[in-house]
Amino acid sequence: MKYLCIDTCGAYTAVAAVNGTNKVYDSDPARAGGALMPMLDAALGKVSLGINDLDFIAVAVGPGSFTGVRIGVTTARSLAYALSVPVVAVNTCLLAAYNSRNAVRADKTVTLSDAGNGYFFAAVYRDLKETLAPCCLTADECKTLLKEHDGFFVAADEAAAKAFGVEPTSGDAIIEVALEKYLRGETTDYAKIEPLYIRLSQAEKNAK
C-alpha cells in the first residue's frame, strides 16, 4: 500500500508516508499552517513515493485544536480530490490508545489530551475498543474519571501529562490504524470527511 498520513490536531504537526514496507514518520512542534506541506513533500521523498501513486490519504479528524483539525482535514480533502483517492478518518483518542498498546502493551487505557482553557479531551478503551466516547471534561472531571478507572494506563499528551502527573505518550500508530481501517473498507469520499469537534470554539461561545 502507498499512502500519506496527516495529524495536525495537537501541539505537533505529524506526517507519515508509506510505500509498501518502506515508511517514515516525522513530527515537528511547528504549527501546521506553514509546516505541513513541506513535511509531506519531505516524507514522500524519503520513501521514494510519488504523489500520484497514492492509494489513499489518512487524516486525524480530532478531537484537537479547532485550527489544527481544520487545516489537516482541508489538506486531506484537497489532496484526495486532486488525486481521486479515498480518505481514511482517524480519531486521535484511538491513536493514543494504540500508541499506549504499542509502547507498554496496555490493554486498558484512558486517553487525555489538552483541549485548552482548562479542559481536556478524554476517552476510554479496552482492548482498543471504545468504552467511553471522546468527550470534553474539566480537570476535576478527569480526576474522577481516572479514579473510576484505577489500574488503566493513562495515555496523555504533554499538557495533560503535566496536569495529571503521568508520562506523555506518543508514537506513529496512525500508520497502523490507517491501514487497518482502509483494509476494512472504512474510507470516505473527500467531500464527506468531517472534523470531530466535541466542544464549541471560543468564537462560537462568544456568538451565543
Image: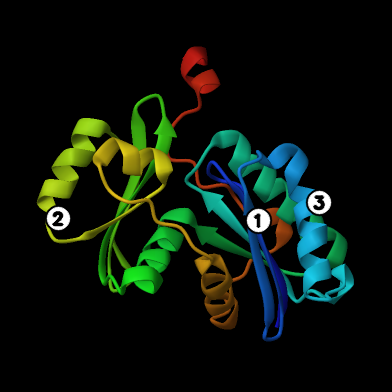
- Which residue does the numbered mark 1 point to in the structure image? 192
- Which residue does the numbered mark 2 point to in the structure image? 149
77 over 49 or under it: above or below: above
Residue at mark 1 to residue at mark 2: CA–CA distance? 35 Å
Is label 3 or label 2 in front?
A: 3
Which residue corresponds to the image point at 70% horizontal and 63% vertical from the top-left? 189
Look at label 3 and name its amino acid: Pro
Query: Would residue 126 appear left or right of 60 to someone viewing this image?
Result: left
- Which structural element holds mark 2? loop
Looking at this view, is 201 or 150 the one in front?
150
Give how far across and how far down residue 45 sits, in percent. Answer: 83, 68
Label total for image: 3
Is label 1 or label 3 in front?
A: 3
Mark 3 or 2, nearer chain start = 3
12 over 120 or under it: above or below: below
Labels 1 & 3 near each other (Cβ < 8 A): no
Residue at mark 3 to residue at mark 2: CA–CA distance? 41 Å
Which residue corresponds to the image point at 67% horizontal and 70% vertical from the top-left? 24
Look at label 2 and name its amino acid: His
Mark 1 or 3, nearer chain start = 3
- Which structural element holds mark 3? helix
Which residue corresponds to the image point at 41% horizontal and 59% vertical from the top-left? 96
Which residue corresponds to the image point at 85% horizontal and 66% vertical from the top-left? 83
Query: Would residue 106 appear left or right of 98 to someone viewing this image?
Result: left
- Which structural element holds mark 1? helix
In this rendering, does residue 136 appear at all?
no
Disc on res. 38: 3
Disc on res. 26: none
Give how far across and how far down residue 131 sits, in percent. Answer: 26, 61
Residue at mark 1 to residue at mark 3: CA–CA distance? 26 Å
In this rendering, does residue 145 appear at all?
yes
